[in-house]
Amino acid sequence: MKRIVFKVGTATLYENGKLSSRIDDIVELLSELNKEYEVLLVSSGAVGAGYTRCPLDKSKLENKQALAAIGQPLLMKEYKERFHKYDVTVAQVLVTAADFDSRKRTDNAQKMINVLLENKVIPIINENDSVSVEEILFGDNDQLSAYVTYYFNADMLIILSDIDAFYTDNPKTNKNAKPLKIVTEINDEWLKQECNPNDKFATGGIVTKLKAAKFLMDRGKSMFLTSGFDLSDVKAFLKGEHKGGTLFKSEK
Ligand SMILES: Nc1ncnc2c1ncn2[C@@H]1O[C@H](COP(=O)(O)OP(=O)(O)O)[C@@H](O)[C@H]1O
Ligand SMILES: N[C@@H](CCC(=O)OP(=O)(O)O)C(=O)O
């Protein structure tokens, strides 16, 4: 395995409306991994960051677009400063669903990503929320990160979430829910659940993660869902030891 895409969600980056120290641990891990692998990061958090400066009503689309425009440079500043401590350069890459619509556009983006990775620069990718209107909108970074993994030829996607695995039921509401270690097929019933992200600025939830997993599994790639709060499982997994976290991998 050479090229890995990491995705981090709003609920991992933010706590009670403030940036969490979890970002420090994630930056440390990715800086270390960048020596051995080609690392790409899909990061949410622009809308949440914007709200810390300008609390607009995010139920209006134009306000949400404005919050992303305010927050994206703030988020990048936080990453840039932290990665700089490890002498790692980062690049901001903002995409819309339309960038994956045509072969030509995808090829162009892929070439640019290859240049960044050849130069050990970590691309930090987000949806271009400030210009993404409905017809070109992914709407969530789980599915966007699956596209990034597939179209930019990564070997796998690792989702760092506020939950440490995929469970038989929502573990926040059902204490008897059990974590699954491996999922080889996505059950259509799972995809019909409501999307209930845990942070008011998040748009994902478990369903978008399952859709991302299905997209990749249908194309022969795998996805690992693990905790962004405690990085010990992802570290173990990358050393070949599967302790916690769910691996989505088709047997076909
Ligand atoms: N079967 C399930 N397994 C794991 N989490 C689930 C399940 N059903 C619902 N969830 C909820 O999905 C949440 C993860 O989605 P989300 O809050 O959007 O995370 P992120 O910010 O990492 O994208 C979990 O915290 C949990 O409350
Ligand atoms: N693009 C948005 C985040 C969208 C999103 O998918 O959020 P999350 O469910 O926390 O991964 C932002 O930067 O605020």
Image (cartoon, helix red, strand yellow):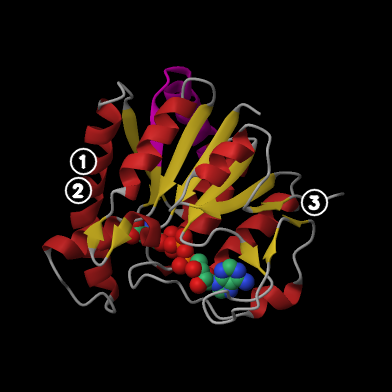
Q: Residue furthest right?
A: 252
For the residues labelled 3 and 1, say whether their Cβ atoms are less than 8 Å apart: no
Callout 2 amino acid: Leu
Measured in 3D between alpha carbons, the distance from the residue under mark 2 to the one under mark 3, in whole angstroms, is 38 Å
Q: Is residue 35 above or below residue 74?
A: above
Percent from the top left, x then y, of residue 18? 22, 60
Q: Residue at x 38, y 62 (%)?
A: 11
The image quarter in which residue 86 lies: top left
Measured in 3D between alpha carbons, the distance from the residue under mark 3 to the one under mark 1, in whole angstroms, is 38 Å
Q: Is residue 172 above or below residue 2?
A: below
Which residue lies under the disc numbered 3? Answer: 250
For the residues labelled 1 and 2, say whether their Cβ atoms are less than 8 Å apart: yes
Query: Could you say whether the residue bearing mark 3 is in a helix, strand or loop?
Result: loop
Q: Which residues are magenta?
A: 105-124
Callout 1 amino acid: Lys
Q: Specify which label sits upstream in the sequence, 3 or 1.
A: 1
Query: Could you say whether the residue bearing mark 2 is in a helix, strand or loop?
Result: helix
Percent from the top left, x then y, of residue 23? 33, 46
Q: Residues within 10 Å of mark 2 (few under 14, many from 20)?
A: some
Tag shown at residue 74? 2
Between 248 and 70, the one nearer to me in the picture: 248
Q: Is residue 63 above or below residue 234?
A: below
Between 46 and 238, the one nearer to me in the picture: 238
Q: Specify which label sits upstream in the sequence, 2 or 3.
A: 2
> In the drawing, does residue 184 fall left or right of residue 194?
right
Which residue lies under the disc numbered 1? Answer: 77
